[in-house]
Amino acid sequence: MAEVEVTPAWGMSGRGAADRAPSTQGVAVPVVVTLVEAPACHLCEDAKSALTVLAQSYPMTVHVVPIGEEPGRTLMQHHRAPMSPLVLLDGQYFSSGRLPRRKLERHLARLQRGEAHE
């Protein structure tokens, strides 16, 4: 059996990981992050950069939705976001405007530990 390296955010890692029974403890389910961006928005670019960095440590899937398209407009109206970027975590409102990075990282860490949503 070939040995597979798995990043710690996804579960077991290191030598012999393939020989042990899989464990659900420490296995994080990827968070779906939806970012509604506006054109020429420096806060949107900043949020995308921050998400790129956080994605190296936490499992996530990022969907970028342009505000100029119907899905983006609908999300902005539904969540009553006053400004871009609108950030949703698993479909729930997280922030609008400047992305609170530390708050997001704490939230992702709680999810990775298996703690429930706030």
Image: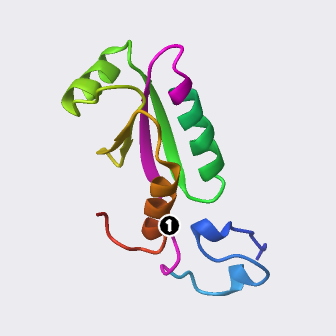
Along the horizontal axis of the image, is 68 left or right of 39?
left
Q: Is residue 99 magenta?
A: no
The residue sitting at 58% across, 33% down in the picture is: 46
Q: Is residue 93 above or below residue 17?
A: above
The quadrant holding residue 72 is top left
The quadrant holding residue 7 is bottom right
Q: Is residue 110 above or below residue 38?
A: below
Q: Is residue 40 magenta?
A: yes
Horizontal and vertical percent for residue 98? 46, 36
Residue with the most extreme bottom position? 20
Label 1 crowd (10 A; few <14 / some 14-19 / many >=20):
some
The residue sitting at 74% across, 70% down in the picture is: 4
Q: Is residue 34 above or below residue 9?
A: above
Horizontal and vertical percent for residue 96? 36, 35
Horizontal and vertical percent for residue 104? 46, 54
Along the horizontal axis of the image, is 75 left or right of 3?
left
The figure's colour scheme reads: rainbow
Q: Is residue 98 above or below residue 67?
A: below
Residue receiving disc 1: 109
- Residue 102 vs residue 51, the one in the foreground: 102
Q: What span is in magenta? A: 24-43
As helix, strand or loop, the secondary structure at mark 1 comes to: helix
Q: Is residue 14 visible?
A: yes
The residue sitting at 47% across, 60% down in the picture is: 108
The residue sitting at 40% across, 26% down in the picture is: 84
The quadrant holding residue 51 is top right
